[in-house]
Amino acid sequence: MRYWNLTYNDPDRWDEVYAITGRPVPFFKGIAQGGTGSPRGVLIDVPGEASEMLGETSNVKYCNLQRTQQGAILYFKIRLEVYGIPLGDHEVLSMRRELQNRTSHPCVFTLNLASGKQIQIACDEAKAGAWELFFKKCFVRI
């Protein structure tokens, strides 16, 4: 799994991302299907080099996903740079929802990837239903 720095508008970089996930869902089709963006979550864990970047600062790493025609793009920000991890619908095998003993962001979603790795996203309990519905729209196997 790879991540890209998407801060700057580089058409070649976007072509690589879209080759994995497909283009974004068209505007009117997205409205008809209930939107193309996820609620805001907190990125807890990602595999590989992106995990090392998360530990560089002590700031909360907010994230969101944009639905595409064949999956989604996970966006997160570190310092002033915006990064994206393209997730094709065939890459996410399953999703698990857990409640944690924490006051802030007690609900944690774990996405199990085909590579054997995991992505963890935390959210408020009130938004957990919206996150679950969003994951089911994006990834066919869930």
Image: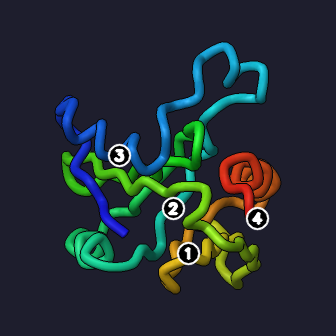
Counting residues from the start of the chain, the first of labels 2 and 4 encountered is 2
Counting residues from the start of the chain, the first of labels 1 and 3 encountered is 3
Mark 2 surroundings: few (<14), some (14-19) or many (≥20) residues within 10 A: some
Q: Which residue is mark 3?
A: 17
Mark 4 surroundings: few (<14), some (14-19) or many (≥20) residues within 10 A: some
Counting residues from the start of the chain, the first of labels 4 and 3 encountered is 3
Q: Tell me the kind of residue under disc 2.
A: Val
Whether the residues at callouts 4 and 1 have beta carbons within 8 Å, the answer is no
Q: Tell me the kind of residue under disc 3.
A: Val
Q: Which residue is mark 1?
A: 113
Image quarter where the N terminus lies is bottom left
- Name the element at disc 1: strand
Q: CA distance from mark 4 to mark 1?
A: 11 Å
Counting residues from the start of the chain, the first of labels 3 and 2 encountered is 3
Image quarter where the C terminus lies is bottom right
Residue 126 appears in the picture as rendered: no
Q: Which residue is mark 2?
A: 42
Percent of width and height locating residue 110: 63, 75
Instruction: Identify the residue shown where x is 55% and y is 75%.
Output: 113
- Name the element at disc 2: strand
Q: Tell me the kind of residue under disc 1.
A: Leu
Q: CA distance from mark 1 to mark 3?
A: 17 Å
- Name the element at disc 3: helix
Report whether 62 appears left or right of 2: right
Whether the residues at callouts 3 and 2 have beta carbons within 8 Å, the answer is no
Instruction: Identify the residue shown where x is 29% and y is 51%.
Output: 83
Q: CA distance from mark 4 to mark 3?
A: 22 Å
Whether the residues at callouts 1 and 3 have beta carbons within 8 Å, the answer is no
- Name the element at disc 4: loop
Numbered mark located on residue 47 in the image: none
Q: Which residue is mark 4?
A: 142
